Image: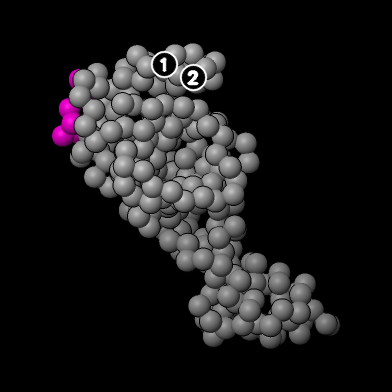
Amino acid sequence: MIKTRILDLPTQAATHAHPEHQLVVGLQGCADFEVMGQGGAVNRLHACLVPGGEAHAFSGRGHNHMLIMDLPAEAQGLSGYADERLEVLFDRPRFIELDHHLQGLLDFADYTLSQSRSAAGMNWHLGGVLLHALHDRLSAPEKARSTGLDAAELHYIDIFVQEHLDQGVSVAMLASLVCVSPSHFHSLFRDATGKTPHQYVLEIRLREASRLLRETDLPVAQLASRCGFSSQSALNHAMRRQLGVTPRQLRLGRLH
């Protein structure tokens, strides 16, 4: 039996697992998911596919509105969607961007489910349409991104990097935020900013490290870790190469 509901996910991170496959579609706001070591964001017209039985962590970012659909591994009669295609679609975690023409369907589902009306019949049709759309989207995953990254997405990426400086921010993590492959993200990002993702992340880390050196008395080793550098030596090397000064020189310079 398919179970569909509308939820506002809590900001406090939680982890659970269930035997059903799960489809999460963003209606409003944003939520973060991590499944089998793969992390990504779900915002408006983006979806996360969680394979059945896999533990996954999730948390909302402030106000959010998510459509969540639990799908049994065997969902006969799902508007013509074959079980073997369902198995392929949920063979691993996926973060996918949906086409804009589905917005009307999602608005209708949001309204109907939010009114607590009986949706047993709608579940099968809604599930079938969404799964067909996701399957088609996977056939040409880069097609919808040929126009490049927009200002809102770049701002979202910037916030994510700043909030995760103390972690290993990878190209794969950034690519998942906008639902493209790492290789495609690399070219999209460079076209939009003139920088590689690595150069961009390094600039933010050095900017924050410079600020902390000027404004705080944190030990350099602790400061380096907070900004995502593997060691004090790594910070020293990057700062000398990119800025032409050492952390010690920058900190002493504030006294003059």
Q: Is residue 97 visible?
A: no
150 falls in the magenta region: no
For the residue pair 221 and 65, the one nearer the viewer reads as: 65
Which portion, as a residue range, is magenta?
80-85
Res 37 label: none
* Residue type of the residue flagged with mark 1: Ala
Q: Is residue 196 above or below residue 50?
A: below
Q: Compared to 157, does 250 lie above or below?
A: below
- At x 61%, y 71%, the residue is 226
Which residue type carries mark 2? Leu
Query: How far from the left and from the top, in percent, is residue 254?
Result: 79, 79
Point out the tag, 2 or 1, that comes first from the N-terminus.
Answer: 2
Residue at x 62%, y 36% (from the top left corner): 63
Per the image, the residue denoted by label 1 is 119
Mark 2 in CB contact with mark 1 (< 8 angstroms) = yes
Q: Residue 161 sits in which quadrant?
A: bottom right
Could you say where residue 92 lies in the image, as x and y percent from the top left? 28, 47
For the point 53% across and 32% down, which residue is it?
A: 7
The span from disc 2 to disc 1 (Cα, nearest Å) is: 7 Å
Q: Nearer the viewer, residue 44 or 189?
A: 44
Q: Dividing the image into 4 quarters, which one contains the N terminus?
A: top left
Q: Which mark is residue 113?
A: 2
**Split into 4 quadrants, where in the image is the C terminus?**
bottom right
Vertical comparison of 200 with 249: above or below: above
Q: Residue 163, position in %: x, y?
A: 59, 57
Q: Is residue 1 left or right of residue 230?
A: left
Q: Splitting the image into 4 quarters, where does residue 137 fall? A: top left
Indicate the quadrant where residue 98 lies.
Answer: top left
Is residue 56 in sight in this rendering? yes
In the rendered view, would you say 40 is above or below 139? Answer: below
